[in-house]
Image: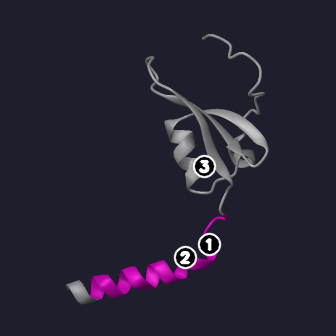
Amino acid sequence: MNAYARSAQSMASTIANIGRQRPHLDLRILTSEYGGPLGPHFLVAVGDKYFRVREMTLQQLRLGIPPEEMDLDEVDPDEDREED
């Protein structure tokens, strides 16, 4: 397969996936906490709901995967964070 064929295949794949893209989420990172053995965690707002997530979950949210599909637990940002 030459470079032209690879480019054409890549373009065809991209065009085929256009209708399958996920909708944009209203995602905001409110706080970032670093340190600890599991890496950073974030308090994020998706629309009017708040969640505590790790880096991998944050990346999934950025890709447009809704929190409902990941079974995330909603948190109250005004309550004190429970210590692990």
Q: Is residue 12 magenta?
A: yes
Q: Earlier in the sequence, mark 3 or mark 1?
A: 1
Q: Describe the element under mark 2 as helix, strand or loop.
A: loop
Q: CA–CA distance between discs 2 and 1?
A: 5 Å
Q: Are marks 2 and 1 in contact (CB under 8 Å)?
A: yes
Q: CA–CA distance between discs 3 and 1?
A: 16 Å
Is residue 82 or residue 77 the one in the foreground? 77
Please give the name of the residue rendered at 65% of the width and 62% of the height, measured from the top-left corner. 24
Which kind of residue does numbered mark 3 sit on?
Leu
Q: Earlier in the sequence, mark 3 or mark 2?
A: 2
Q: Residues within 10 Å of mark 2 (few under 14, many from 20)?
A: few
Q: CA–CA distance between discs 3 and 2?
A: 19 Å
Q: Residues within 10 Å of mark 3 (few under 14, many from 20)?
A: many
Q: Residue at label 2?
A: 17
- Asked whether, in this view, residue 11 is left or right of residue 32, the answer is left
Q: Position of residue 21 (x, y in %)?
A: 60, 69
Q: Describe the element under mark 1 as helix, strand or loop.
A: helix
Q: Residues within 10 Å of mark 1 (few under 14, many from 20)?
A: few
Q: Residue at label 3?
A: 61
In magenta, the rendered stretch is 5-23
Q: Residue at label 1?
A: 20
Which kind of residue does numbered mark 1 sit on?
Arg
Tally of numbered tags? 3
- Residue 5 circle label: none
Which kind of residue does numbered mark 2 sit on?
Asn
Please give the name of the residue rendered at 47% of the width and 78% of the height, measured from the top-left corner. 14
Please give the name of the residue rendered at 74% of the width and 32% of the height, measured from the top-left corner. 73
Q: Quadrant of the N terminus?
A: bottom left
Q: Is residue 28 above or below residue 6?
A: above
- Asked whether, in this view, residue 83 is left or right of residue 34, the answer is right
